[in-house]
Image (cartoon, helix red, strand yellow):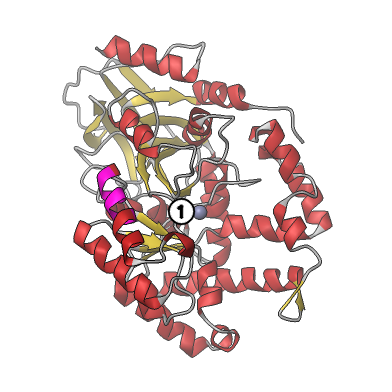
């Protein structure tokens, strides 16, 4: 059975090197950042068996383990696998396995897919991963991206939510402003079927209405939810942040995608964006489109005047505000999740680490950022029993880093190896995955 899994895995990835697949392995002398509290446990041995964390113990403990493989973790740091909580599969041409390579090479072991487009079947993807037929991250998915045109009548609501139930989508995603009566009916019907609702904010209603969802995507939504004056009123914002905290809702800021949009509007930034290092991992045609003036943001926003203001300084102002408000939310201890909204120059996997940097720039501590990428999303997804921390009995989804991420979050990029479901991928194997998806852009 195990051989079958290994061969399948090799087939999926087309790797020329074999997996060092073992029943049991241990990572020795390693610094563990377990994430259930803010500590670094030095000089640890982490024993992995059957895809689970069997033991986390001091190296001084000499109890016997039938360990087939030992990984030297000296001077290195072990963190739980990362969560990309705002993923989109945008490129049919590349196939989803292409994205999985990028995600895995960047330490992402759980993905929340945020829309199902016409040509996709994310339930089939999720099921294939769950059944071990497809080697990929833990996978969660919303149904289709729902806009007001999809939800016009009670009959639409009944049909669409019943379809979510029948197809077993994990979430209902609302991406548009709805009339109040429709919105309330969606919430009620979804509650009947016990499917969580999340998505963009309801910008035309008071904050409390949006807070009835399970999460709000994009801190940008608060720019529109609040008026110009409210955005400048620090007392109002503090109260709003407290109200958000009290509601128990989770916020996924997705700062990196907004930064990309801003960069598209400025010729100098755009020239740099086209040549950014990770553009190598965009599909050729995709890069050609985004790097040209067909780029939708250049088409629709560049040089335009919005509310009497030029789009570029307006959006730059919004971005500064978004970072400040993200910091205010963190100060009130609002649970947050890391997601990047993967499209254009926001390349899956790499973009999550860019999001980390923006969160750090906003003023979140490295620990808060790691928590938003491990423990908080695991709690949100209901997988906390098995994911999100490095503790005994949890699934072995782990990332080994060369440098301490609690000193600077950019150190999450110093990936030495990734464990996905107990399968160890060392740096060479991760590089092979990246090599397979490289294209001569830039
Ligand atoms: Zn999205």
Report the residue at 27% width, 27% height from top.
Answer: 131
Look at the numbered disc 1 and say if its residue's Cβ is closer than 8 Å to ligand 1. yes
Q: Which residues are magenta?
A: 160-166
Quadrant of image for the C terminus: top right
Residue matched to label 1: 145
Count of numbered circles on the image: 1
Residue sitting nearer the eye, 194 or 156: 156
Q: Residues within 10 Å of mark 1 (few under 14, many from 20)?
A: some
The overriding secondary structure of the stretch rendered in magenta is: helix
Locate residue 206, reporting x and y percent: 42, 82
Q: Position of residue 121 (x, y in %)?
A: 41, 36
Assess whether residue 430 is covered by the magenta stretch: no
Tell whether position 163 is magenta.
Answer: yes
Could you say which quadrant of the image residue 77 lies in? top left
The structure residue drawn at horizontal position 41% and vertical position 66%, both measured from the top left corner, is 152
Using the rendered view, name the quadrant where residue 209 is placed: bottom left
Inspect this view and state whether residue 63 appears.
yes
- Quarter in which the N terminus is drawn: top left
Q: Is residue 16 left or right of residue 179?
A: right
The vertical placement of 24 against 332, above or below, is above
Closest to the observer, 168 or 374: 168
Q: Position of residue 293 (x, y in %)?
A: 80, 50
Estimate the x, y position of residue 96 in percent, counting from the top left: 49, 32
């Amino acid at each position: 059975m195990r051989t079958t899994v290994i061969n399948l895995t090799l087939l999926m990835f087309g790797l020329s090197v074999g997996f060092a697949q073992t029943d049991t392995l241990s990572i020795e002398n390693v610094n563990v950042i377990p994430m259930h509290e803010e500590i670094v446990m030095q000089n640890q041995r982490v024993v992995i068996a059957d895809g689970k964390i069997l033991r986390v113990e001091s190296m001084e403990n000499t109890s016997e383990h039938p360990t087939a493989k030992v990984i030297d973790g000296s001077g290195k740091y072990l963190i739980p696998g990362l969560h990309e909580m705002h993923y989109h599969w945008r490129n049919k041409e590349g196939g989803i396995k292409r994205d999985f390579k990028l995600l895995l090479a960047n330490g992402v072991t759980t993905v929340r897919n945020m829309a199902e487009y016409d040509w996709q079947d994310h339930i089939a993807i999720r099921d294939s991963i769950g059944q071990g037929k497809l080697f990929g991250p833990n996978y969660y998915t919303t149904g289709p991206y729902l806009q007001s045109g999809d939800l016009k009548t009670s009959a639409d609501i009944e049909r669409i939510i019943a379809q979510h139930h029948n197809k077993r989508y994990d979430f209902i995603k609302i991406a548009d402003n709805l009339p109040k009566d429709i919105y309330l009916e969606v919430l009620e019907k979804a509650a009947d079927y016990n499917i969580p609702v999340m998505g963009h904010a309801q910008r035309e209603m008071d904050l409390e209405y949006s807070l009835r969802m399970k999460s709000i995507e994009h801190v940008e939504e608060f720019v529109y939810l609040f008026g110009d004056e409210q955005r400048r009123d620090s007392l109002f914002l503090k109260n709003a942040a407290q109200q958000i905290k009290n509601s128990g809702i989770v916020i996924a800021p997705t700062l990196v995608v907004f930064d990309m949009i801003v960069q598209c509007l400025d010729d100098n930034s755009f020239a740099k964006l086209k040549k950014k290092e990770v553009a190598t991992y965009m599909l050729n045609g995709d890069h050609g489109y985004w790097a040209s003036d067909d780029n939708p943001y250049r088409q629709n926003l560049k040089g335009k005047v919005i509310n009497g203001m030029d789009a570029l300084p307006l959006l730059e102002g919004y971005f500064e505000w978004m970072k400040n408000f993200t910091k205010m939310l963190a100060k009130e201890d609002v649970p947050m999740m890391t997601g990047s909204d993967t499209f254009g120059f926001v390349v899956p996997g790499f973009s999550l680490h860019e999001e980390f940097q923006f969160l750090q720039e906003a003023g979140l501590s490295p620990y808060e950022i790691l928590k938003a990428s491990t423990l908080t999303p695991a709690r949100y997804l209901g997988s906390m029993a098995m994911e999100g921390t490095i503790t005994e009995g949890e699934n072995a989804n782990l990332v080994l880093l060369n440098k301490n991420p609690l000193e600077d979050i950019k150190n999450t990029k110093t990936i030495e190896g990734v464990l996905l479901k107990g399968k160890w991928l060392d740096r060479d194997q991760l590089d092979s995955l990246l090599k397979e998806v490289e294209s001569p852009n830039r």
